[in-house]
Amino acid sequence: MTIRFITRRQKLDPRATVRYPVAIYVGEKDAKAFKTVEDYKRRNYYYQVSQGYGWCTFISLVELMIWLLNGLSALTRDFGVAIIILVLIVRTLLHPITKKGQVNMVKMQKKMQELAPKIEEIKKKYANDKARLNQEMMKLNINPAGQILTCLPMMLQMPIWVALYISLSNNILIRHQGSVFLPWVHDMTVPDALYTFASPIIIPVLGWSIPAFNLLPLLVAVFMYTQQKLQPKPTPSPNMTDQQRQQQEMMQKMGPMMSVMMLIIFYPMPAGLNLYIMTSSLFGTIEQKRIRAHIKEQEEAGTLLKPKDVPVAEDGSGKPRKPSFMERMQKAVDEAQKKQVRRPQKPKTKPKTKRKP
């Protein structure tokens, strides 16, 4: 340990003395101790820990992740099992949004296939009137919220990933802790290092140094690719132009490229974070299969595109239940579109021209 002490210039009288009281803490960054020990609270040592929480997530979320991991590990006696249980909790909470987003996306695709001829007809008819074109498109009641909802679970999990990564760096209880599921991992806060090379491998041009072969990031990329393959893909419309068809094919090729990017990004990450993302992708793949089976059942029964009646409670009482948040949001979007269509268009006024004298 090295301590560096720097003072400002100070002019002293002959035989005068100046005292510099200094307190040095040598120990673990124990957030619990910093919050409970009176001397640590008075010196605000916890500020030094919270400063490492970063700006990509919330401090309260990092503290929640640390509390959950420590609590689950106290019950299971294994941080690997605690991380897997944490994945199940997050996946269960996000399942209604995930299912709603996937179903809405398939509905959107089916509806777009049915409306493709009308859309092309409107585009040709009002090619020179953009305002009228937008109004006629809104009359078709095409709601893009379904496609946005498919990305929502991933967007909601991003702050959790960041909070988990930061908690692994600031949670002293998880240091040097492995898992029975990963016998080669002896520390969840560093890369898993299944096999350490005799000398690091240097990637040409990039200059990256790879000291060991990490298995978990590779599994993360494989499971994420599998999960993306199970997501519903848009069916090309016969009325699409060559440029639109090429753009759609390019978007479909982005899946494997994203998996490779995830491998590069998460290769040097801690084993605990990779275990979380790998398990989340694995459970996400199982969830995707169940959702696809549910959509197939609705398609075979002919109820996928059938408009919903008044929602009824599931307890058999026949009383109408309150619509969910996603149902209220979709209803608000539909009403806003209808108001936009009914809004009268302002007449175009010709610019005034000055008369020549």
Image (tube, grey):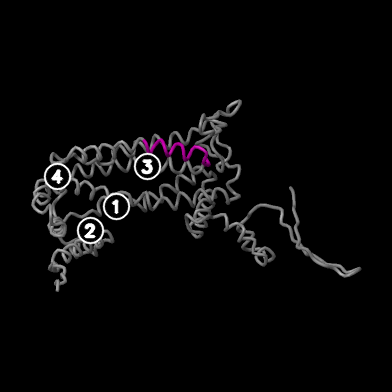
Per the image, the residue denoted by label 1 is: 149
Q: Which of marks 3 and 4 is nearer the N terminus?
A: 4
Name which of mark 4 and mark 2 comes first in the sequence.
4
Q: Nearer the viewer, mark 1 or mark 4?
A: 4
Give the camera-side residue of 13 and 348.
348
Residue 113, label in figure: 4
Alpha-carbon distance for marks 2 and 1? 25 Å
The C terminus: image quadrant: bottom left
Q: Distance between the residues labelled 3 and 4?
A: 31 Å
Disc 4 element: helix
Characterize the local packing of mark 4: few (<14), some (14-19) or many (20 or more) Cα atoms within 10 angstroms. some
Structural crowding at the residue carrying mark 3, measured as other residues with C-alpha within 10 Å and reported as few (<14), some (14–19) or many (≥20): some
Q: Mark 2 points at which residue?
A: 314
- Alpha carbon separation for disc pair 4 and 2: 33 Å
The answer to whether marks 3 and 4 mark residues whose Cβ atoms lie closer than 8 Å is no
Going from the N terminus, do you reach mark 2 or mark 1 first?
Answer: 1
> Magenta region, mostly helix, strand or loop?
helix
Q: How far apart are marks 2 and 3 (CA)?
A: 27 Å
Residue 175's image quarter? top right
Horizontal side of 144 relative to 15 (left or right) equals: left
Which numbered disc flags the more N-terminal residue, 2 or 3?
A: 3
Name the quadrant containing residue 138. Answer: bottom left
- For the residues labelled 1 and 4, say whether their Cβ atoms are less than 8 Å apart: no
